[in-house]
Each structure stands twice: as C-alpha cells, then as structure tokens.
Image (cartoon, grey):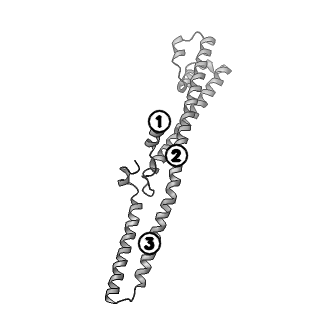
Amino acid sequence: MLFDKKFKKEGVMFIVFPIIGLLLLSLYSMHRIRQITTKNLTRTGDWEFCIVVSSVIIICLILIELIITPIEIYKQRKDYMSVLEYNQRETIYEKKAKALTKEFASYLATTYPEYEKNIYNSIKPNKIDIYLVKYPELKTADTIMALVTEISKLQADKYEQQLLKTKYVRRMKFRSINPWLLSWFIPTFEKLEQKYGTRL
C-alpha cells in the first residue's frame, strides 16, 4: 500500500509547507478583498512581498523534497542490494573457514594422533587459536600455522562483512523514518526483505 501508517508519522514537513502556503495565500486574498471593498489600496507592498517570498520558499522546499526523495529511494534499494552482497560474502567466508577447519582437524588427526580424538570433531573456526595455546608444539608445523592464519583471516573478513551489513541496515532504517523526506514512498528494510524474500 502506498500510504500506510508511516504517512501519519513521517513526511510531516511535506504536508506542513503546502498548508502554510495556503494559509498565507488565503490571508493575503482576504486582505486584498477587504482593501478593494473599502477602497483602501495603500501599503499593500509589505503584504505582497511577504506572501511572494513565503510562497517561493515553500515551493522551493517542495521541489527539493520532490527531487531528493527519488534519489533516496534509489539509495535505499542500492543499500539493500549491498546488504545482500555482504550477507552472501559472509556465508562464503564462513563456508571456507569451516572447510579449512576440517582440514586443520584432519591434519591434526594424522600428524598428532596422541591427542584425544574427540577434540578433532569439536574444532570451530572462531576457536582455532585456543588449540595453539593448549598445544604450543603445533606452532612449529608450517602447514598448521598456514591453516590457522588463513582461517583467522577468513573469520576477520566475515566479521568485517557483518559490520558493513549493520552499518547499511542502520542507514536504511534511518532513511525510512527521516522526517525531511517523503518517507512514505521510501521502502522500509522489512518491506524490501519481504519483496526479495531474503531474511538476513
């Protein structure tokens, strides 16, 4: 639905400006009618100047709103696509980290069979450094250290994607409630999720 509950809350400035303009024009019209009926046509320049300046300001503000809002709608959709991209990257990094963690566990199982077998199944990508602290002799194996470095880099990349995603979601949520925009036209983050069918 084009106009929903947000119409009552946001976009107030867009509604207020035309109302003020109409009030000013009606006041001016009433003043001119009174002057014409009483044949008192002096000192109308002050009123006319105020009405013209006010009307020009209001028209300019409305035009700015009409120009900025479509740009913000474009940015909202673009940011949502960026959020989806960051979500996909995060998933890829997580899959790679899990695959390398399995490789790490299998390397440990073949190279160091004296360690308990149950730890090999419980190794997680975000806790891989714990095993280096627990078993310091693992630091001497170049293959293990290369795997740990790569897994740590993937985990850092994953967290970076989460931070970027959070930043974009925050920006999108603010844009949809910004009172200086025609915010009832800007799709909310939740509506974009429904439209594209992807939960983050």
What SS does tag 1 mark?
loop
Q: Which residue is mark 2?
A: 77
In-front residue for pair 161/198: 198
Answer whether residue 71 is visible to the viewer in this image.
Answer: yes
The Cα atoms of the two marked residues, 2 and 3, are separated by 34 Å
Q: Amino acid at mark 3?
A: Ser
Q: Which residue is mark 3?
A: 55
Q: Which residue is mark 1?
A: 197
User: Is 32 drawn above or below residue 190 in the view shown?
Assistant: below
- Badge 1: residue crowd in 10 Å (few <14, some 14–19, many ≥20): few
The quadrant in which residue 136 appears is top right
Answer whether residue 200 is visible to the viewer in this image.
Answer: no
Tell me: 139 left or right of 7. right
What SS does tag 2 mark?
helix
Q: Amino acid at mark 2?
A: Arg
What SS does tag 3 mark?
helix
State which tag comes first along the sequence, 1 or 2: 2
In-front residue for pair 37/56: 37
Q: Amino acid at mark 1?
A: Gly
Q: Residue 98 location in percent, x, y?
A: 56, 23
